[in-house]
Amino acid sequence: MAHKESFVKVCGITTQQDADLCMELGADLIGFIFDEKSPRAMTVEKVKAIETENVMRVGVFTHHTADEVRLIMQRAKLHLAQLHGDQDTEFAARVGKQKVMKVFWPARYETREELEAEMKKFVDCSRFFLMDAGTSGGGHGKTQNWSFLNGLRGYKTWFVAGGISPDNVSEVLQGCAPCGIDINSGVESEPGKKDPEKLKAVMEALTAPILP
């Protein structure tokens, strides 16, 4: 496969089949959701049973305590905790700097300077940042104002999420030039089931030259 311009995280994995598909197509990270309200919710036992190679395993957490997150990560063999709630810097530090992907919602901020000020607080207790659509939660398929993120300060390797699909992935790349993209509902045939053709189309878009 040609060199990708951005890292790719595929979230909402629920089966070994979809994990295998992600690895085959060259995903860098795969995400498992630990929120029972999600249609893609997973248990420790189910995640532990999914075998992966050469990809980072990410758990998405919204309401667990830091100690619960650490225990789940250990039992489910996770590399990263995606803090997808309003967890503070103390929470992130307790999970561990090299183990945190901190989520921000750019739509909460009136200016990019305000967003960057909030990002700066988490520099010393996070490994990656993720900019999600909407003002809370995730996995709702909403898109965001990509140009608002264009030229964002490079405090950390940062990913973008929000309704990214074969139809708009090129627009996302051109709009804000992220370090990575996080895809979920935009490459599904139904919640929790990835569509091979959609996923392949997104991966191919990442290796295609971006035209001026």
Image (cartoon, rainbow, N blue to C red):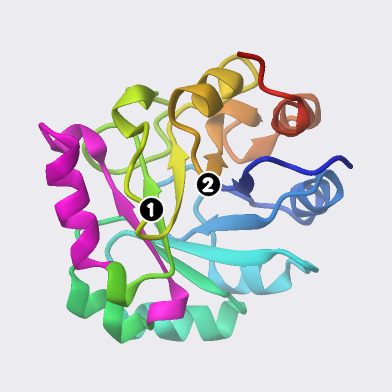
Q: Is residue 201 above or below residue 124?
A: above
Q: Position of residue 167 (x, y in %)?
A: 61, 14
Q: Quadrant of residue 49?
A: bottom right
N-term-proximal mark, 2 vs 1: 1
Image quarter (top left, top right, bottom left or bottom right) of the C terminus: top right
* Residue at image location 64% in from the left, 30% down from the top: 188
Q: Is residue 44 left or right of residue 187?
A: left
Q: Quadrant of residue 196?
A: top right
Q: Which element type, helix, strand or loop, lies under badge 2? A: loop
Q: Amino acid at mark 2?
A: Cys
Q: Which residue is mark 2?
A: 179
Give the magenta range.
Answer: 97-122
Q: Which residue is mark 1?
A: 154
Q: Are marks 2 and 1 in contact (CB under 8 Å)?
A: yes
* Residue at image location 82% in from the left, 46% down from the top: 21
Main secondary-structure element of the magenta-colored stretch: helix
Q: Quadrant of residue 118?
A: bottom left
The answer to whether residue 64 is visible is no
